[in-house]
């Protein structure tokens, strides 16, 4: 069995057991590498740390966006709710350009 | 701006995480999922950039899990650290179990595989320590750092 197969098999088993969601590690690694020219080597654990960090990030931004949705007395979370949540949260300042562009 | 889909996190995974955290009757527009997909991708780039700068300043070539945790904390996401440490421990535990079971079952077949693989190929994989996760067995430094409590992960600021 190829090691990569062992690994992804392990991760899907782990999600089932731990009830956590996994984001594809290869994709995370790709995004990391694209982030800068000087990102050349990435340890095995870095994408794993990110898979959890991204999950937490998405959860936090979603919760904050939902607050905006409720303020508008709606039940459908819209793009503008995400933008409002980004504007209202200091640590999401790095996303300001992204949400104002789209 | 339309991004190629393979440069973003998959929208299905992102949508699932969003759905899980919202009330059962909540709906999510497709555009909101797309925006979240882009934001999460940008999050990775942003944090990686910070971690990579640190490695560069310290003359290190490899961005590791500790660097990511440090960057998260520096950028204001320190409340994620505890959950990440727990997740890492669970992952390593699962990996140890997996390795134990595999070594019992595939002792013979793994010897055959080793004979087939060229030794230089395996060596180059280990030295770069980048692509394959099976190298956790040969990447003990992060494990040791966490166990000894030297890293920022286990020492509260």
Image (cartoon, rainbow, N blue to C red):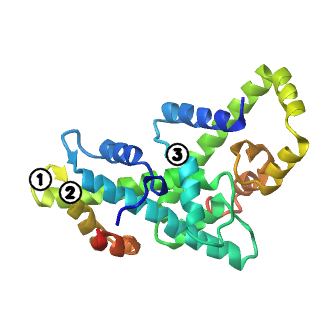
Q: Which mark is residue A74?
A: 1
**Residue mark closest to the camera, 2 vs 1:** 2
Q: Which residue is mark 3?
A: A24
Question: x, y percentage for residue A102?
Answer: 29, 68
Q: CA distance from mark 3 to mark 2?
A: 25 Å
Q: Residue at x 9, y 55 (%)?
A: A73
Q: What's the chain of the residue with tag 2?
A: A
Task: Say yes or no: labels 3 and 2 on the same chain.
Answer: yes
Which percent across, then down, holds residue B21? 32, 46
Disc 2: which residue: A78
Q: Are marks 2 and 1 in contact (CB under 8 Å)?
A: yes
Judge from the rendering whether residue A74 lies leftward or rightward of residue A36; answer left or right: left
Q: First in sequence: mark 3 or mark 2?
A: 3
Q: Chain of mark 1?
A: A
Q: Position of residue B31 (x, y in %)?
A: 26, 55
Q: Residue at x 26, y 50 (%)?
A: B30
Secondary structure category for the residue under label 2: loop
Structural distance between the alpha carbons of marks 2 and 1 = 9 Å
């Amino acid at each position: 069995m190829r090691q990569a197969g062992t690994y992804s098999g392990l991760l899907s088993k782990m999600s089932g057991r731990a009830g956590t969601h996994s984001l594809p590690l290869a994709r995370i690694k790709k995004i990391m590498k694209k982030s800068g020219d000087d990102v050349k080597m990435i340890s095995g654990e870095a994408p794993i740390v990110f898979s959890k960090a991204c999950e937490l990030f998405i959860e936090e931004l979603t919760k904050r966006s939902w607050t905006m949705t409720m303020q508008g007395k709606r039940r459908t979370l819209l793009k503008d709710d995400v933008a409002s949540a980004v504007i209202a949260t200091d640590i999401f300042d790095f996303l300001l350009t992204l949400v104002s562009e789209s | 701006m339309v991004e190629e889909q393979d440069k973003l996190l998959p929208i299905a995974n992102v949508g699932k995480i969003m759905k899980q955290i919202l009330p059962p009757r909540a709906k999510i527009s497709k555009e909101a999922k797309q925006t979240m997909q882009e934001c999460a991708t940008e999050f990775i780039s942003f944090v990686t950039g910070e971690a990579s700068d640190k490695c560069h300043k310290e003359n290190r070539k490899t961005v590791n899990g500790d660097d990511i945790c440090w960057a998260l904390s520096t950028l204001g996401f320190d409340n994620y650290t505890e959950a990440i440490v727990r997740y890492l421990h669970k992952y390593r535990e699962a990996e140890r179990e997996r390795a134990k079971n595999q070594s019992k079952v595939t002792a013979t077949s793994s010897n055959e595989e080793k004979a087939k693989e060229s030794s230089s190929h395996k060596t180059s994989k280990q030295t770069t320590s980048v692509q394959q996760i099976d190298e956790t067995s040969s990447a003990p430094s992060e494990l040791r750092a966490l166990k000894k409590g030297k890293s920022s992960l286990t020492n509260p600021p």
